[in-house]
Image: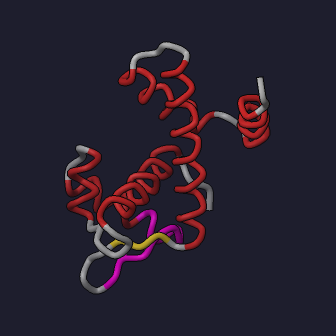
Amino acid sequence: MKIHASGEDYLEAILILQKQMGESAVRSVDLARHMGFSKPSISHAVGVLRDGGFLTVDKDGFLHLTEEGREIAGKIYERHQFFTEHLIAAGVNETTAEEDACRIEHAISDESFQKLQRYFMKPK
């Protein structure tokens, strides 16, 4: 199943919350608070992601990324960190860098991202 940028954002947010709160401590209400969205919006997105096989919800309401969901979340998180860091290093203010990184992380191809990573890792 193809996942849209908004779905990638939800998965990334769950991963970030799991890093902060613990692997089995994230609920939809935490995601709503973190993302600033309404509970019904989060509930709908969680349902779509669950039906797509990207996450599961246990009997206590905790969200768990599937292997595929974790892979996508990790990829998006890595890109977000990379672009935020390099935009700030280039002199972009932090807020703008975060916002731009969020857009770039979804649009860039795997090939271009890997080439940029290698380029920036080269010794100067």
**Residue at 62% from the left image edge and 62% from the top image edge:** 1
**Residue at 62% from the left image edge and 34% from the top image edge:** 107
Q: Nearer the viewer, residue 56 or 98?
A: 98
Q: Is residue 13 above or below residue 86?
A: below
- Is 19 situated left or right of 112 in this image? left
Outermost residue on the top side: it is: 91
Which residues fall within the magenta stretch?
48-58
- Residue 111 location (% of width, % of height): 79, 39
Whether residue 11 is in magenta: the answer is no
- Residue 77 location (% of width, % of height): 52, 48
Task: Tell me how the rendering is colored.
Answer: secondary structure
Q: Nearer the viewer, residue 84 or 54?
A: 84
Mark count: 0
Q: Nearer the viewer, residue 52 or 114?
A: 114
Q: Nearer the viewer, residue 73 or 4?
A: 73
Using the rendered view, name the quadrant where residue 67 is placed. Answer: bottom right
- Residue 2 location (% of width, % of height): 62, 56
Q: Is residue 28 above or below residue 77?
A: below
**Residue at 45% from the left image edge and 57% from the top image edge:** 11
- Residue 9 location (% of width, % of height): 44, 47
Q: Quadrant of the C terminus?
A: top right
- Is 44 situated left or right of 3 in this image? left
- Is 42 situated left or right of 92 in this image? left
Outermost residue on the bottom side: it is: 59
